Image: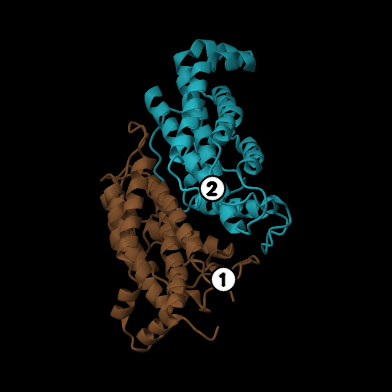
Chain colours: A brown, B cyan
Amino acid sequence: MIEPNLELIAARLEGLEETIIARLIDRVQFASNLVIYEKGKSRFIGVEGLSLFEARLVAQETMDSEFGRFAVPEERPFNRNLQPPKRLVSIPENCLRVTDYDTVNFSADILAGYLRLVPRICEAGDDFQHGSSVEMDVYALHAISRRIHFGSFYVGEAKYSAHPEEYRKLVAAKDIEGMTRLLTRKEVEDRIIERVKGKVARLQADVNIAVRRLIDPELVAEFYREIVIPLTKRGEIAYICERDPSL
Amino acid sequence: MIEPNLELIAARLEGLEETIIARLIDRVQFASNLVIYEKGKSRFIGVEGLSLFEARLVAQETMDSEFGRFAVPEERPFNRNLQPPKRLVSIPENCLRVTDYDTVNFSADILAGYLRLVPRICEAGDDFQHGSSVEMDVYALHAISRRIHFGSFYVGEAKYSAHPEEYRKLVAAKDIEGMTRLLTRKEVEDRIIERVKGKVARLQADVNIAVRRLIDPELVAEFYREIVIPLTKRGEIAYICERDPSL
């Protein structure tokens, strides 16, 4: 059985920050284009009931599923009923002790949080770059989801294995508050938020604002504080509750 | 008829640099994984003759085509025989004077140049992140292709309209060398290459190398010097030769 390596896990989570920031910067190059989120306005033949954004998310995840993306624990889909992979995917052995990774899937909450973020970070209005906007939305969402689910699974496992007795009791008592208390490290959270804010600022420090739009570092920090970190913690708890010690 | 605005065109080209660099940085997070480029080794059911990379490029462009990506002049596909869009795409009026944008399509050369770049920028070996690697390849290629084709069309039109008589004569005489001389601005090319190199360095200046891999700024500058800029110039000439003054 592989043991969780907290140092590697933290490194991976830190490395994913650049990806999330880059994807959000990509998205803000386009206006908010809010019509792309309106159901029935996709003008896409065959999926008239969906928004253009939803149509893109379905198409992307249908393709990604064929390529085996969702065989990876931290890649949790936003859609259900996707087809199984069309290729043989080799997934390295891991330290997780759940068989169905979709028992920890916070996609709906991630999506809701992201859709609230878009109008805050993007320029208001419509620049008719609808295809590009939904493309960037999907990439940003996948990057955010990867970070949250990676944390949920691997940090969940690492924290559990550091205090198995305490967690076992809290799970048995269904004490979510107690688990939240036990796994919360306020100083780590604050450090992550500050680091993210600094990265956003530095990644844009030399940008020519005549040709590129910027994202407010404070808004990304807030997104981490209000969405990414709380959902990761809820994911850790979900993982710990689903964890099967017999595996 | 809309006139080309050189300032806007240059701004767009400059803004695309960040996107190319970000996509290349994404790719180098994974090993070169050269097996993904070998035909017949995709392990993907239904496309056994292709490489995994080719299978991904086909799947992505099939989806993108349905969403209308290739209705945009600078979005030229790498694959042929794609299906027409499934949505009504509004393309703003532009200054270009060709009806079939695919008469200027340098995808094959872009692909060849990119595939030579991969083993130079990525860590050698195989990390089994094949799905992610081909995903990042496709995004990087699209970003590079967008820059080269945008320049081909819009810079081509701008340069032509600045010297219509000279270009008309050179086109009539099929004098490619003469056209190359007329449209080359060595000092602009050098400035672009230096700017790109500086951006690559600055975008990575504060990165924690324990968690992220870096790309050598010199290699990206070289890619601009040897691939991006020469292909853009060949594209400008192709556009000028295809240009239909009656439009």
Residue A28 drawn at (x, y percent) = 34, 45
Residue B194 drawn at (x, y percent) = 49, 26
Q: Residue at x 60, y 38 (%)?
A: B107
Label number found at residue A115 = none
Whether residue B133 can be seen here: yes
Label number found at residue B213 = 2
Q: Secondary structure at mark 2?
A: loop
| Residue B159 in the image: above or below residue A238 | above
Looking at the rendering, which quadrant does residue B78 occupy? top right
Residue B216 drawn at (x, y percent) = 56, 37
Q: Nearer the viewer, residue B116 or B209?
A: B209
Q: Residue at x 63, y 55 (%)?
A: B55
Residue occupied by mark 1: A94
What kind of residue is marked 1?
Asn
Q: Nearer the viewer, residue A162 or B45?
A: A162
Label 1 Cα neighbours within 10 Å, binned few <14 / some 14-19 / many ≥20:
few
